[in-house]
Amino acid sequence: MDLWYKRPLCTPDDSRCFQQSYKKLLQEHLHSPVFDFFKSSFKMSKIIVYTQEGFEGGTAEFTNNVQDLERKGFNKVISSLKVIGAPWVAYYDKNFAGQQLLFEEGEYPSLEDNAQFSSLKIVTDDLDDPEITLYEHEWYHGRSVTLKEEINLQNINFSDVASSHKVRRGVWVIYEHSHCQGRQLVSFPGEENPKYFSASFNDVASHVRPLRPQS
Ligand SMILES: [Ca+2]
């Protein structure tokens, strides 16, 4: 970028000259794509939760993981929410366990999983070049498929088959039903899930999709 190669015509010890030159450069480039990129990178990601539907009742704002919503006074009461920036995963149990549900940027005035959540995790992982391998049996045995993009598992004869998986890169959402419906299993980079029984997810996965970097 031009910006970084333009040198103000000042002597090294003339700090006032430097300041004025850089101020001018900043003004000239404030609306350039490079600054738009920086502004979007620094957008503050957060989740705003409410105890009643329609963004009413008690409210709180979180910018970091909440391992136990009870400590914040919001255990199993969240009934509507807004996500700004990065996606969040809400869990039925504390310590990011139990049934889970992904919320991408947007407003959710009512929730199917009303008043169920006990912990919240923000997605800050690298989402580039996603890759997951699904296996027919637990402990990575049987037939397997390695995927790099969203797919309806019916299309590759792997619906209601998966019993374990390994995520190499990216954050993946595995859905109980086609077209991203039903229960979800959210998996993070490097995560290995040797058997789905604990999540009652055995032989039900029908659709998978990786989260995509925000534009
Ligand atoms: Ca299976």
Image (cartoon, rainbow, N blue to C red):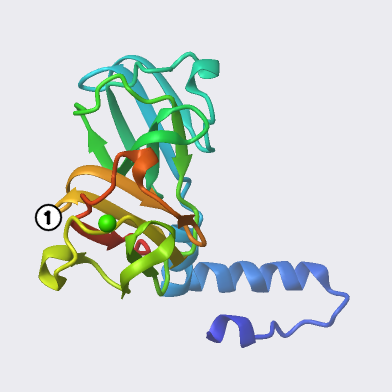
Find residue 115 and report its horizontal and vertical position in percent.
30, 19
Q: Depth check: give the residue in front, 115 or 124.
A: 115
Q: Residue at x 78, y 67 (%)?
A: 16
Q: Residue at x 24, y 37 (%)?
A: 107
> How many numbered marks are there?
1
**Residue 4 horizontal side relative to residue 175, left or right:** right
Q: Within the image, what quadrant is residue 4 found in? A: bottom right
Label 1 near ligand 1 (CB < 8 Å): no
Find residue 84 and report its horizontal and vertical position in percent.
37, 43
**Residue 123 horizontal side relative to residue 58, left or right:** right
Q: Within the image, what quadrant is residue 17 found in? A: bottom right
Mark 1 sits on what residue? 179
Image: 146 above or below 91: below
Q: Would you say residue 169 is visible in this rendering?
A: no
Q: Would you say residue 49 is visible in this rendering?
A: yes
Q: Depth check: give the residue in front, 207 or 20.
A: 207
Image: 144 above or below 81: below
Q: Depth check: give the residue in front, 86 or 118.
A: 118
> Circle 1 sits in a helix, a strand or a loop, which is it?
loop
Tell me the quarter of the image containing the C terminus.
Answer: bottom left
Find residue 67 and report its horizontal and vertical position in percent.
54, 30
Image: 109 above or below 146: above
Q: Residue at x 85, y 80 (%)?
A: 12
Q: Within the image, what quadrant is residue 143 found in? A: bottom left
Find residue 194 and report its horizontal and vertical position in percent.
44, 54
Amino acid residing under circle 1: His
Image: 130 above or below 159: below
**Residue 59 horizontal side relative to residue 143, left or right:** right
Query: Badge 1, how many Cα within 10 Å: few under 14, some, many 20+?
Result: some
Q: Residue at x 19, y 28 (%)?
A: 112
